[in-house]
Structures are given as C-alpha cells and as structure tokens.
C-alpha cells in the first residue's frame, strides 16, 4: 500500500495540541537557527524564520526590517522612540513540530513570516524579537534581487552530514569511523568560504542529507548556527555560520536522511518543514517536497529525488512528480535564460557499490535525463554518493546492450552547449570508498588534495562560470591533547576545478504550456459545478443556475520549428519558423496574426519587428509559419530572446525563440 504523503500543514501541529508538552517561560530562552528563505518574488519579498528554544503556548513574535545604513539598524524599530519611519513590521506566524532527541519526543516552537513590498536590489537590516526574548536578536543584513535578468553568484552544498553520518569515512580520518573532523566543523568552514567570497553568493542550496538523522533538533542547530561542544566543553568558532545564515537565504532539498527514523515511513521529519519554509508550489498534494523559484533570470528546480523509499516502489507518486517537473520546466524555459535542477540522488552514480552488481534506482536516470534534454537544463547538482564529480555535457541515448535492472538510457558525451552537465558534491569531506572516476562520462573528479568543496556558480548573460572550491584542510599542527584543537581546520577557498557551461537550447518541439480558453461551462444548478467547456476544464460552481465560467483547453499551440535560424550576423535577416497546431474538433476561428517582437538590442540601426496574418489550420492539422526578422547593423552581439505572439480572435498564445547574433 502506498503511504500517505502529508502536506506541511498536516505535519506541523497546532499550539493548542501541544500546550501541555511545551515548557513554560524560561530565563535561558533564546532565539536560535534564525535564517532566510526565498518563497516568493525574490526582488520584493524575503522569508525569515527562527526557533525559540524555550517558548510556551502564549509566545508571539515579530520581525522588523529597514533599509541598511540607518542608525541603529532594524533593532531601532524596537529600541528607538519614536521608531524610524522606514521600519517594516512583520508579525510572525507560529507553529510547533516534534522531534525525537534522545527518544523523548519534545516539541519545538518556530516562527516564520515573509516581508513583502520590498524594493528590488536593496539591502535590509533585520531583527527579530518575541515575548520570551524581548531583547531580540540581530541576525544580519539581506539583499533583494534585481527585478529582471542580472548577473549573480550562487552556491550549492551536498552531503553536509553535520553529525558525520553512520557509514562514511570522513576526509582526514585515519580509518573508518575515526571521525577526526566533525561535519559541523567542516560546514562552518564552508560557510566561511562562501560568506567571504569577493562577490557574496545570493543564496545557498543544499542537495539534502544535511544531517544523519533529520528528527533531531540538535542537528539543525549544528547546521544553521554551527553549535557543537567537544569533550572538555571546548566549542568551535561558529561566527561564519551565523553571519552566512543571517545574510544569505539557505534552501534545501530533501535527502534520504531527512526521512531517517521518522514515525511514518516515507514521510520526512516535521523538523525539516519547520526549518525550511520552501515555496509551496510543488506537485499537487506534495507541494512542500519539491519546489522551484526564479532568481534574476535563472530558474531553480529543487526536486525530491530520494523520498526515503525507492521510486519504483511507488510509481504513481513518482510519475506525479515527473509530470510536475515537466510542466515546471516547460513554463520556465520561456521566461528564464538558464534552468538548474538540484536533486539529492544523482542520475549518474559515482559509488561502485551503487553500480555493480546492480544499479541503484535506474529510474532516476531513465526518467530524469529525457526531461533535462527536452528543456535544455544547463546543469544538475546532486549529493548522496559523497564524491565531488563533474560530467561532460551529456545527452541520453538508448543503452545498446541493456539488461534488466540497468538504466535503459546511457550518457552520450556532446559538445558544450548541447547537453546537461551533471555534478555530484560532498561539502564537508564525506567520502565513500569506490569512486568510479574512470567512467567515460566523467570529466573531472576529486583527489585527496581537492576535497572537501563547495560549488560556486556565476550566472552571466549567456554562459555560467562555475568552480569547485576547496573549503578547508586539516591543521597538522593541532595538538591532539587539546580538545579545542582536535580536528581543527584551516580555510583555503582554493578553486580546484574551473569550468564554463554555455546556454543549452531546449528541443524545438517543446509545446507552449499556455492554453487557449475553452467554451463557457454549462449552466450550474443551484450552486453545483457547471459542465466542462469544449474539451476544457469543468466550470466552477454556478450561482442558482447561472453559467459556470470558461473551461480551459489547448485548442491551439505554437512551437518553435527546428527550421528556425539559431544564429545570424548583424545586418542580415534571420529566418524564423513556427508550428501552429490545431488540436480541437471545432472549426478553426479563421485568420490569426503572428508577431515577432524583437528586443531593442536587435533593432539598433535598421533592425525590424515583423507581423503577418496566418490562416488557421484545419482541425487536427498543423501549419509551419515563417517570419523574416532583420537584425540591425549595430545590434548587440550575444544571445537574444525574441517574444512571438499569436493572436487568434480574442486569444493570445506566446512563445519565445533564442537567436544568437554573431559579428
């Protein structure tokens, strides 16, 4: 039987349910794990969250923000009289979640809220306070995104395992289970390298497995604020973790260890959802398990790809997620210049025991690769195998000598810009034995001198500059007799693999997801739903017999033809071709108008936009429509996105074509 996969609202228990389990007000109450998340328009919103470690049922909390640079920062919104006029006051929502620290099953209290109406590309100081900690806490300063496409840097983490993991040979260890470097120490070293980059990354995304047991609140404390105590009560310097979490949004995918020891198999820890208020835009019924967001012209899809059970065991669940991924990328490829996927388990295993004698979860490769090819995803980042590996650009081809339990698709190495780059990552030195570094798809892999590492990406106009950056090295001068020096790391920040990823075009036959409205639904009866429109969706409830509203249907679609010009020289004419399909049984609506709207950068010194009338094809038929678009003599070189509109009666269908302007 397929288990139920609860949404976030079912996992987080109401305060009234846990009133008896929560401790009363305590003198040592403190705000911990304060950090940032992207859940809406990154240019105008920012989500903040924290854990109050000694709250009771009456606690409430507020966050404050104001443009950076003002006297007293955001704390002045509370401490100054009168409060500065530019203060933004945000009452926070409260929820409680259960963990199993020491099998005691305590509840923890979390406060979360989203600042809205912020100004794009602006720095804000923020401050939080609650009734148990009235003095409040100053986490740091965050910055909103630009409102359009822009160049920026982002970082990814993988296999953080702040508590080291239960079967991992740690980097620097003398033998298995000799964890001479604590994962939390490696994580804070990584935080320091990321925070101190010349251009600070806009956000960090983890591919999951942030700790060994996602039901233990103390492990989230290690991850989000770097807390740890050695024997002898010595503690590591956690200032880098606090600075990074207070200024840079930290996002995460679900890994199999976020599911470990949960009360219901196949269900992630409630503490994960409490700490990571991710965008609630995933597959229906699974909204909080996969999600996506845009940032300055780049689309990030964070895919749940290790749900604590194998996808083959729950095919309906996995197919539902794949359908969402298809729709998500189809919409994104037309509005963003790059597409990125982060998923815990990799489509290409680098761990020998996961390839031989049987391949672990071959459906990850067979189901994921075609979508990456279809939509021209530039790169995929994964963890799970605890190695640092980079592939060549790859496309999927049928496996010629396929056997049962092996992937049906194999990687084909293609030229840069023609396929997806697959990256595997281990950020704090976790290193499984059996690295498959001689596989033909491997372009670069780790050595003892190049790990552990973070990945840094700089998103330019039409290419991505990327690098694995080594975060730390074991301090050989540390005195093993001094607890504070045991496992001490020296930050390096040294790039160990630099590479460039060009834009990867989507396949030309990608169907535009924008539907044309169907006919109006049938009349509702006493408030019941109206019937379906012409092959459209069911109309909503009528009111005492009035009509339901329009159904939705994909009567016509407009796609880019393979015959379209991919590049053109300045001063020349680009031949654009599009395919108009009529998928309805109804009669065509007649003449349509097709318009190519070229950006100003293409129209300089003689360039033109173009429009022409087109006869709608017969039902079930398609027609190729050609447009000529002159490129100006001084047009800007590089790749440009051209918006193409088809107007058919009162309906408008939109698609985009990328055109590269050469010298």
Image (cartoon, rainbow, N blue to C red):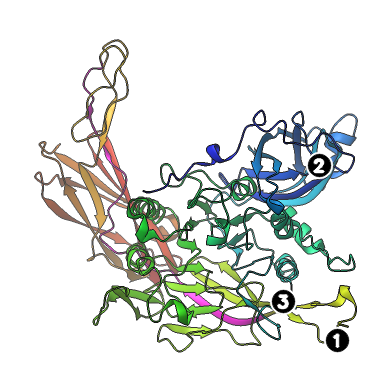
Q: Nearer the viewer, residue 545 or 180?
A: 180
Q: Is residue 627 visible?
A: yes
Structural distance between the alpha carbons of marks 2 and 3 = 41 Å
Residue at x 51%, y 84% (from the top left corner): 435
Q: Secondary structure at mark 3?
A: loop
- Please state which of the two labelled residues, at mark 2 or mark 3, is closer to the viewer: 3
Give the labeled residue for mark 1: 477
- Please state which of the two labelled residues, at mark 1 or mark 2, is closer to the viewer: 1
Residue 52 in picture, x, y percent from top left: 76, 42
Residue at x 67%, y 33% (from the top left corner): 18
**10 Å crowding of disc 3: few (<14), some (14-19), many (20+):** some
Q: Which mark is residue 104?
A: none
**10 Å crowding of disc 1: few (<14), some (14-19), many (20+):** few
Q: Nearer the viewer, residue 452 or 570?
A: 452
**Residue 322 as seen in the image, left or right of residue 551:** right
Is 590 located above or below residue 401 in the figure?
A: above
**Residue 465 as seen in the image, left or right of residue 371:** right
Is 509 part of what is drawn in magenta? yes
Q: Which mark is residue 179?
A: 3
**Which stretch did the figure color magenta?**
495-524
**10 Å crowding of disc 2: few (<14), some (14-19), many (20+):** many
Quadrant for residue 615, please give it. top left
Is 198 part of what is drawn in magenta? no
Pick the quarter of the image with the C terminus. Answer: bottom left
Q: Is residue 143 visible?
A: no
* Mark 2 or mark 3, earlier in chain: 2
Quadrant for residue 601, please give it. bottom left
């Amino acid at each position: 039987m397929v288990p139920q996969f609860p949404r976030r609202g079912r996992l987080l228990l109401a305060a009234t349910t846990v009133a008896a389990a929560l401790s009363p007000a305590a003198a040592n109450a403190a705000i911990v794990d304060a950090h940032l998340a992207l859940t809406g328009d990154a240019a105008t919103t920012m989500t903040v969250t924290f854990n109050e470690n000694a709250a009771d049922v009456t606690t409430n909390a507020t966050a404050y923000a104001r443009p950076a640079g003002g006297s007293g920062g955001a704390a002045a919104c509370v401490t100054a009289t009168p409060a500065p006029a530019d203060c933004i006051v945000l009452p926070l929502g409260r929820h409680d979640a259960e963990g199993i620290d020491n099998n005691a099953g305590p509840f923890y209290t979390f406060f979360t809220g989203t600042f809205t109406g912020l100004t794009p590309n602006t720095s804000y100081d923020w401050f939080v306070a609650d009734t148990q900690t009235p003095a409040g806490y100053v986490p740091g300063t965050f910055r909103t995104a630009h409102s359009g496409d822009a160049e920026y840097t982002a970082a990814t983490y993988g296999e953080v395992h702040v508590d080291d993991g239960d079967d991992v040979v740690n980097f620097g260890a003398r033998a298995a289970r000799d964890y001479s470097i604590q994962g939390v120490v490696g994580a804070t070293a990584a935080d320091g390298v990321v925070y101190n980059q010349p251009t600070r990354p806009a956000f960090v995304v983890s591919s999951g497995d942030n700790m060994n047991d996602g039901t233990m609140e103390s492990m989230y404390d290690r991850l989000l604020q770097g807390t740890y105590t050695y024997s002898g009560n010595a503690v590591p310097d956690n200032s880098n973790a606090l600075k990074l979490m207070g200024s840079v949004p930290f996002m995460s995918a679900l890994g199999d260890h976020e599911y470990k020891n949960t009360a219901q198999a196949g269900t992630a820890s409630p503490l994960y959802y409490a700490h990571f208020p991710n965008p609630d835009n995933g597959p229906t019924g699974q909204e909080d398990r996969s999600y996506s967001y845009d940032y300055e012209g780049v689309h990030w899809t964070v895919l749940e790809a290790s749900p604590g059970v194998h996808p083959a065991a729950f095919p309906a669940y996995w197919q539902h997620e794949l359908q969402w991924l298809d729709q998500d990328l189809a919409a994104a490829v037309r509005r963003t210049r790059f597409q990125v996927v982060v998923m815990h388990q990799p489509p290409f295993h680098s761990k020998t025991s996961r390839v031989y004698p049987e391949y672990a979860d071959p459906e990850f490769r067979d189901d994921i690769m075609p979508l990456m090819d279809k939509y021209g995803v530039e790169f995929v980042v994964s963890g799970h195998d605890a190695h640092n590996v980079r592939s060549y650009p790859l496309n999927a081809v049928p496996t010629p000598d396929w056997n049962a339990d092996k992937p049906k698709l194999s990687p084909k190495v293609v030229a840069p810009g023609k396929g997806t780059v697959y990256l595997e990552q281990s950020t704090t030195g976790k290193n499984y034995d059996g690295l498959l570094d001689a596989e033909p798809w491997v372009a670069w892999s780790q050595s003892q001198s190049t790990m552990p590492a973070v990945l840094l990406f700089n998103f330019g106009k039409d290419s991505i500059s990327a690098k694995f950056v080594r975060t730390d090295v074991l301090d050989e001068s540390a005195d093993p007799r001094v607890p504070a020096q045991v496992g001490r790391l020296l930050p390096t920040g040294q790039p160990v693999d630099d590479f460039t990823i060009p834009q990867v075009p989507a396949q030309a036959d990608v169907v535009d997801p924008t539907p044309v409205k169907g006919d109006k639904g049938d009349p509702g009866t006493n408030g019941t739903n109206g019937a379906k429109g012409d092959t459209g969706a069911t109309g909503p409830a009528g009111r005492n017999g009035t009509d339901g509203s329009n159904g939705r249907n994909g009567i016509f679609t407009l796609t880019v033809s393979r015959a379209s010009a991919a590049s053109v020289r300045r001063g020349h004419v680009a031949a654009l071709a599009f395919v108009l399909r009529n998928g309805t049984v109804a009669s065509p609506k007649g003449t349509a108008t097709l318009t190519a709207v070229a950006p100003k950068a293409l129209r300089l010194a003689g360039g033109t936009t173009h429009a022409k009338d087109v006869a709608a094809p017969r039902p079930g038929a398609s027609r190729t429509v050609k447009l000529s678009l002159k490129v100006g003599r001084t047009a800007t070189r590089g790749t440009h996105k051209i918006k193409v509109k088809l107007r058919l009666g009162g309906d408008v269908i939109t698609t985009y074509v990328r055109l590269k302007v050469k010298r």
